[in-house]
């Protein structure tokens, strides 16, 4: 097998280049954590202040679909991790297959999320002029839904970016540009994908579980 | 080693002589050479500086008379917003990091380029795009919220182009993040052999600390502005109390970014001054390790003090006490730097060239700016001077007296390296002195004005304040001269300056070992660090006779 | 560790992650009252640590990566703690 690695001129060896990519993506993720941090902060502050309204609002979300979606996303994390490992073994076709499954799971997540959004819209939970809340404290309930749509929306946006990256990786792996020697782009994509999961892992309990009444 | 190693050359390998040899538009716009990207940033920020400075000039002219005869209140609001937004995000934040940092970081590390050269060029394009949006927002009518975009005024009441301006700042923020990321990775991974952390130049330390802030604070601003703009466009509550939100949350989020951003606007300046003091005293910086760590300490502490901008908001008094205390702590690393610079001067063989004049000016002005900062960090005193010209004077002493002086000093110091030619020294010295005097005449009266109670952001004022305002405006015109002159003679020197040679200052460091201007690949052969930084020969130890 | 072991390990981590998901949803049936948020956040934190350490491979990375990955979370903690210090103490009086 003719696995080629590319060394860019500013680096003196492949090890240094790999470490740099890894450090780069992690610095970026630190930045992303702070980006979502603003939303998490807003949610925490308002939930502490308006616990009642937030709990009530949260009970109108679809817990079953969200749990299912969490499982879908966790599964995609597994397939992504396996894809990265399989690429390092030089198993081109299993890497391709796993990457495809990961993208499809991402799409499935978005589809389920879409169904949820439509359901929310019909229940009049979308903030703005379409917001129709008959219960008490509509102002703070609407605040919950503003944050809900923003947080899940930004998460979905990042997921779509992740899917785009995986599609590029699929192409590069197919062409042989990503291989057992030149694996860093795929590893970096994998780390980004897991970060998107990480966000959801906190969104799920905060938005759906904290106020749930069973 | 891999079986087949393919080396991809990012740059034009024919351009061997210097990074400036090839002069086509395409070679500039598609360059991945960090030195060229640095220059692209320089040209861009000069434009923004000119626009923002003109806004300040009109404001100062307007304040010549108590009634504010030149512009109307609304225009005045738009002018100070324009001045603030452009100066903060499109001049000060990219000034030293993106121009001098880009140019110098790989040179000082003995590296061929930054870790991610293409990303570096992309950062510039993002910056220009963001700046374009901001300028467009100004052209179609401007924004009247002040650079702080406080809600609910910005999100609900203002009838100006707030969302567009926020979009410009948002986009430019990504440029900061990517630059910071690039610098962090480069400093960690691309140091020359032998260049350990404690042999790094102090400018590199300060850039590293700055980058940490850029990466961790800027995204919070991005989210804050997004929320504000969404509240404005979507008309749903996030911060608006009428819609269930809390406007103070905006202030928390905004200052979580914007206070550390103040340190983005001074730390690189401190780094430059460390370089200048060492080079022109012919001495290793006194207490190197302390100065290095004080940069990191300022970066960290800078994240813990933002609440001092909110003492007179309805923030909890207890939180206020904590923030006040933490703010005082920042004085420690700052003072460490000032004391160590002063100690470096002691028994150094000092030469007062232009860059050194700027550096000494910096130390004095920064000290005044820092000390008045302690007034503002004091809970009770802040109640008196909050939102007055005292605050304006304070932060201009840091940002103009500090950062811009350092930037000018650095620009003169490394100009021979950048352009390969010397600037006219006598003119340079005169300009440095003019800038220092003009600056003090502009801003010192504002301390008095503020203490007497003149509030900021008003286009008219009671007659008793006129004397100080006239002094300030007179100073501003002198200060303006101090900025126009270098622009003229630096451009002149590109053609007619005397060739600089590799090391016109006899300074220590990798960048002075390569040619001026350096070749595209920076060094003929990769340098190796064999001694500590600033290893100037120790002067003879005979006692000084009185 | 070779890639095959890495695969096995990933499978085990996945089983744990799903089990923890079940645990967090299941905990709702126990009606834990004020402890509910604590339990949920602890479970989320454990899941996140598993992903960071194993899927994102921080566990087998250099100190630099540990530093960078911890940095983001640490700074988020600063943001949350200091802002909450204001909100929590706002109603206090001397």
Image (cartoon, coloured by chain):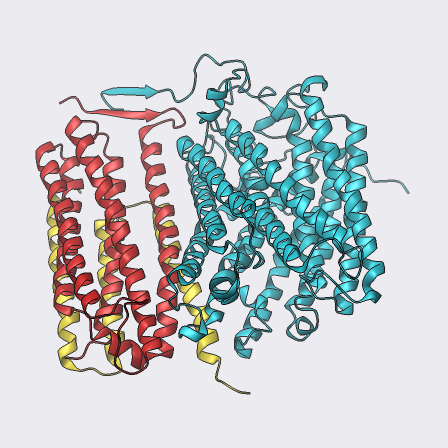
B220 or B500: nearer the viewer: B220
In the picture, measured across the screen, residue A24 lies left or right of residue B532, that is left
B463 or B480: nearer the viewer: B463
Chain C palette colour: yellow
Relative vertical location of residue B63 with respect to residue B8 in this rendering, above or below = below
Residue in the image at 10% along x and 48% along y: C8
The total number of labels drawn is 0
Return the x and y of residue A26 as percentages of the image width and height.
34, 47
Chain A palette colour: red
Chain B palette colour: cyan
Q: Quadrant of the N terminus of chain B?
A: top left
Q: Could you tell me if residue B438 is visible in this image?
A: yes
Return the x and y of residue B372 as percentages of the image width and height.
71, 62
Residue found at the far right of this picture: B546
Residue found at the far bottom of this picture: C94
B212 or A96: nearer the viewer: A96
Residue in the image at 75% along x and 44% along y: B360
B86 or B544: nearer the viewer: B86
Return the x and y of residue C88 as percentages of the image width and height.
44, 78
């Amino acid at each position: 097998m003719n696995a080629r690695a590319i060394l860019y001129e500013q680096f003196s060896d492949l090890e240094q280049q790999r470490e740099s990519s890894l450090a780069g993506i992690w610095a970026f993720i630190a930045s992303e954590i702070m980006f979502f941090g603003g939303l998490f902060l807003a949610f925490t502050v308002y939930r502490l202040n308006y616990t009642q309204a937030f709990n009530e609002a949260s009970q109108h979300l679809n817990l079953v679909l969200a749990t299912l979606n969490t499982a879908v996303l966790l599964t995609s994390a597994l397939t992504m991790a396996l894809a990265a490992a399989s690429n390092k073994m030089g198993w081109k076709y299993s890497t391709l297959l796993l990457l495809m499954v990961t993208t499809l799971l991402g799409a499935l997540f978005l589809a389920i999320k879409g169904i949820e959004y439509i359901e929310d819209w019909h229940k009049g939970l979308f903030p703005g002029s379409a917001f129709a809340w008959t219960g008490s404290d509509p102002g703070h309930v609407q605040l919950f839904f503003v944050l809900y749509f923003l947080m899940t929306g930004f998460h979905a946006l990042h997921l779509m970016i992740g899917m785009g990256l995986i599609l590029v990786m699929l192409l590069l792996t197919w062409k042989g540009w990503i291989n057992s020697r030149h694996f860093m782009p795929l590893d970096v994509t994998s780390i980004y994908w897991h970060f998107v999961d990480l966000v959801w892992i906190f969104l799920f309990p905060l938005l759906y579980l904290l106020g749930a009444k069973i | 080693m891999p079986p087949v190693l393919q080396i991809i050359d990012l740059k034009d390998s024919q351009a061997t002589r210097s990074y400036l040899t090839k002069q086509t538009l395409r070679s500039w716009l598609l360059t991945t050479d960090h030195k060229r990207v640095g220059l692209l940033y320089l040209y861009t920020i000069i434009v923004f500086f000119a626009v923002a400075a003109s806004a300040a000039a009109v404001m100062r002219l307007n304040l010549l008379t108590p009634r504010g005869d030149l512009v109307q209140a609304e225009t005045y609001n738009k002018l100070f917003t324009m001045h603030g937004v452009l100066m903060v995000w499109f001049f000060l934040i990219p000034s030293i990091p993106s121009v001098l940092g880009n140019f110098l970081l790989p040179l000082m590390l003995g590296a061929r380029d930054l870790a991610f050269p293409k990303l570096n060029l992309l950062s510039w394009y993002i910056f220009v795009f963001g700046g374009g949006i901001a300028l467009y927002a100004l052209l179609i009518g401007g924004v009247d919220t002040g650079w702080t975009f406080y809600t609910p005024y910005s999100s609900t009441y203002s009838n100006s182009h707030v969302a567009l301006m926020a979009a410009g700042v948002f986009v430019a923020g990504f440029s900061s993040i990517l630059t910071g990321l690039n610098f962090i990775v480069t400093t960690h991974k691309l140091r020359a052999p032998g260049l350990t952390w404690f042999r790094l130049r102090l400018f590199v330390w300060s850039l590293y600390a700055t980058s940490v802030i850029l990466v961790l604070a800027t995204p919070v601003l991005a989210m804050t502005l997004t929320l504000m703009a969404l509240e404005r466009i979507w008309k749903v509550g996030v911060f608006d109390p009428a819609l269930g939100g809390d406007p103070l949350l905006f202030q928390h989020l905004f200052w979580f970014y914007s206070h550390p951003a103040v340190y983005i606007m001074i730390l690189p300046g401190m780094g430059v001054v460390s370089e200048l003091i060492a080079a022109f005293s012919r001495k290793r910086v006194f207490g190197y390790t302390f100065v290095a760590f004080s940069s990191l300490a300022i970066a960290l502490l800078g994240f813990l003090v933002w609440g001092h901008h909110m003492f007179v908001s309805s923030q909890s008094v207890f939180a206020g006490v904590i923030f006040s205390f933490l703010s005082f702590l920042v004085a420690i690393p700052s003072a460490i730097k000032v004391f160590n610079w002063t100690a470096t001067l002691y028994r150094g063989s000092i030469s007062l060239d232009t860059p050194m004049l700027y550096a000494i000016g910096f130390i004095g002005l920064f000290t005044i700016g820092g000390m008045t900062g302690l007034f503002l960090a004091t809970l009770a005193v802040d109640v008196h001077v909050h939102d007055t010209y005292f605050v304006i004077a304070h932060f201009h002493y840091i940002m103009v007296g500090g950062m811009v002086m350092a930037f000018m000093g650095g620009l003169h110091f490394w100009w021979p390296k950048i352009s390969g030619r010397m600037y006219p020294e006598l003119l340079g010295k005169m300009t440095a002195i003019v800038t220092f005097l003009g600056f003090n005449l502009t801003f010192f009266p504002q301390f008095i004005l503020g203490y007497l109670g003149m509030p900021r952001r008003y286009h008219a004022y009671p007659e008793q304040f006129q004397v100080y305002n006239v002094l300030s405006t007179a100073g501003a015109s002198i200060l303006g001269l101090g900025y126009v002159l270098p622009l003229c003679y630096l451009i002149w020197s590109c053609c007619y300056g005397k060739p600089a040679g590799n090391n016109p200052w006899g300074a220590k460091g990798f960048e002075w070992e390569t040619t001026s201007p350096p070749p595209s690949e920076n060094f003929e052969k990769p340098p190796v660090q064999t001694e500590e930084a600033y290893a100037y020969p120790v002067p003879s130890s005979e006692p000084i006779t009185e | 560790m070779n890639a095959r072991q890495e695969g096995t390990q990933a499978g085990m981590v996945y089983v744990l992650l799903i089990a923890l998901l079940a645990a967090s949803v299941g905990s709702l049936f126990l009606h834990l009252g004020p402890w509910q948020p604590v339990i949920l956040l602890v479970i989320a934190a454990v899941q996140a640590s598993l992903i960071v350490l194993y899927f994102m491979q921080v566990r087998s990375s250099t100190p630099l990566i540990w530093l960078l990955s911890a940095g983001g979370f640490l700074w988020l903690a600063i943001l949350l703690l200091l802002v909450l210090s204001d909100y929590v103490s706002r109603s206090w009086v001397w």
